[in-house]
């Protein structure tokens, strides 16, 4: 565990590792940060990483690798077919989850593509706690729809519920009745529910959902991309599991689910992805798609080096000292933010600290993307890159109107074992300044809006000259300091 008690009775998040290799980062002056975000069309995805001070866009493919992961990469068996590396990774995965079959894919969304192609029929509905952007895009691409039945607590910014990602069982029963078993492509549980603030799902909930699906013959799909954080929360927030081995917890999850998939850019802290199942029929259907879309069955689009790193990273997921790193630092950042009055999603989840842009910028209408504007403003005043997770990350309705997001969040992702406590304190300090000056932040509008997943490459402009005024005020207040 890495939340260590202090003499005063408080706790401190402690790094349970040492840095033997480091990368230099640059903090550009504020006027240059302003220029860079303008050049990026106010979209933090379009910034160049060399212009970013702390990259808190995502933990995807940006977690620190361990010495053992690097060492394993040297043993990779490079071959198109029948690579020993594949068999090593397969064994780790089938052992961890207790499943029969493993299919490799180049990343999480590739797994979603294969699963959607196999199970989604036009007009069918996938029921889930909450969507992830790429999940929904692949289901709708196949002509299916989605229905979200997360617990009411899940959509409250501030809550005491320890497992806000839980499915509402009444809503599940009602949805099944209304939609009809034959029209349901699958039920999906997303561990560490990404878009509502990295909120975990309880084992009790997984057991209940699984029992309902089994009784009706509905396939239960598990997105395990954020499982590492979710495991930490099961261990620390559910009394039943305090003394249970993480491996045992993973095996139980494996028993409850029909299909498990993951992004190895997150789970396993490497690159790649994969699908696990014990269902022979579904396996043989999905297997045909892998060589077509991903690569041969023993690499699926992954490099063998990444597969070796993933295998070791998955084993390291059994270590609380490793998997606690993100959640304890997220909690520390949330605590600092709260102490400064900045509204954040509570309780702290995994993945990152999520700032409530709706409250932070309550003077900006959702149609002018308050979370996008806040992410851009943060970059101007700190060089920190966060990610918009609100209306901008939604797709327009078929009639062209905006689909207003249920939550307007700016995510400050904390890649595992990358940033230190002083860097966390720096972020909180700059955010506090921004909060005091929040009324200076204005809205954004699109200048170039892609139809699908527009948040990735869409470009926007500021409504008014608020970015210039904000940069000027920052320079005055900090007396020319960065
Ligand atoms: N499912 C979840 C829950 C995810 O968080 C992601 C990726 C995916 C699926 C897709 O995986 O990127 O390997 O194709 N989330 C990243 C993020 C992009 O920044 O949160 P992928």
Image (spheres, rainbow, N blue to C red):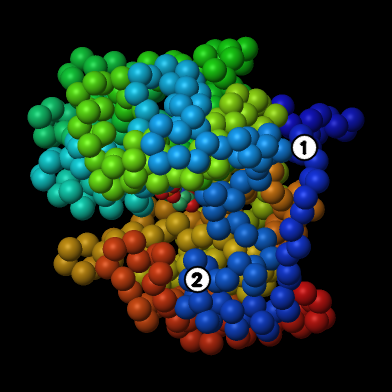
* Horizontal and vertical percent position of residue 225: 46, 38
Q: State which quarter of the image contains the C terminus.
A: bottom right
The residue lying at 42 percent from left, 78 percent from top is 460
Give the crowd class for mark 2: few <14, some 14-19, many >=20 residues within 10 Å: some
Whether 127 is drawn above or below 143: the answer is above
Q: Which mark is drawn over residue 17?
A: 1
Secondary element at tag 1: loop
In this view of the protein, which residue sits in the foreground, 224 or 481? 224
Quadrant of residue 466 within the rendered picture = bottom right
Q: State which quarter of the image contains the N terminus.
A: top right
Secondary element at tag 2: helix
Q: CA distance from mark 1 to mark 2?
A: 32 Å
Give the crowd class for mark 1: few <14, some 14-19, many >=20 residues within 10 Å: few
* Horizontal and vertical percent position of residue 202: 46, 25
Whether 404 is drawn above or below 215: the answer is below
Quadrant of residue 127 within the rendered picture = top left
Q: Is mark 2 within 8 Å of ligand 1?
A: no
Q: Is residue 165 visible?
A: no
């Amino acid at each position: 565990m890495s939340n260590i008690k202090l003499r005063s009775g408080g706790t401190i998040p402690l790094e349970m590792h040492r840095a033997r290799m480091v990368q230099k980062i640059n903090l550009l002056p504020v006027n240059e940060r302003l220029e860079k975000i303008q050049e990026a069309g106010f979209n933090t995805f379009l910034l160049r990483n060399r212009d970013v001070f702390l990259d808190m866009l995502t933990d995807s493919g940006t977690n620190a690798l361990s010495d053992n992961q690097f060492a394993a990469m040297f043993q990779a068996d490079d071959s198109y077919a029948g690579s020993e590396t594949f068999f090593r990774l397969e064994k780790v995965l089938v052992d961890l989850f207790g499943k029969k079959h493993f299919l490799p894919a180049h990343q999480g969304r590739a797994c979603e593509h294969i699963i959607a192609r196999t199970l989604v029929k036009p007009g069918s509905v996938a029921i889930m706690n909450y969507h992830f952007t790429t999940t929904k895009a692949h289901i709708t691409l196949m002509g299916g729809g989605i229905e979200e039945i997360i617990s009411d607590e899940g959509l409250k910014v501030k809550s005491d519920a320890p497992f806000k990602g839980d499915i509402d069982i009444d809503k599940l029963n009602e949805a099944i009745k209304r939609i009809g078993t034959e029209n349901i492509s699958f039920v999906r549980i997303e561990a560490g529910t990404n878009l509502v603030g990295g909120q975990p799902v309880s084992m009790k909930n997984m057991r209940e959902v699984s029992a309902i699906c089994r009784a009706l013959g509905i396939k239960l799909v598990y997105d395990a991309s954020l499982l590492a954080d979710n495991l930490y929360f099961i261990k620390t927030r559910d009394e039943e599991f305090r003394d249970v081995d993480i491996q045992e917890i993973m095996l139980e999850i494996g028993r409850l689910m029909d299909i498990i998939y993951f992004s190895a850019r997150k789970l396993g802290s490497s690159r790649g992805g994969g699908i696990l199942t014990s269902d022979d029929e579904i396996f043989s259907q999905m297997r045909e798609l892998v060589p077509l879309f991903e690569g041969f069955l023993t690499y699926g689009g992954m490099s063998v080096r990444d597969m070796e790193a993933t295998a070791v990273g998955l084993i390291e997921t059994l270590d609380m000292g490793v998997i606690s790193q993100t959640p304890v630092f997220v909690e520390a950042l949330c605590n600092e933010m709260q102490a400064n009055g900045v509204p954040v999603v509570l309780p702290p989840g995994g993945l990152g600290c999520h700032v409530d842009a709706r409250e932070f910028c309550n003077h900006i209408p959702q149609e002018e993307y308050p979370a996008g504007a806040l992410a851009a403003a943060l970059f101007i005043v700190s060089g920190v890159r966060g990610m918009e997770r609100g209306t901008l990350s939604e797709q327009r309705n078929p009639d062209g109107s905006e689909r207003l997001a249920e939550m307007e969040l700016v995510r400050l992702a904390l890649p595992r074992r990358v940033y230190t406590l002083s860097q966390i304190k720096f972020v909180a300090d700059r955010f506090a300044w921004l909060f005091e000056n929040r009324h200076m932040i204005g809205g954004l509008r699109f200048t170039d809006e892609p139809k699908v997943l527009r948040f990735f490459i869409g470009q926007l402009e500021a409504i008014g000259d608020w970015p210039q005024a904000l940069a000027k005020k920052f320079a005055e207040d900090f007396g020319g300091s960065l």
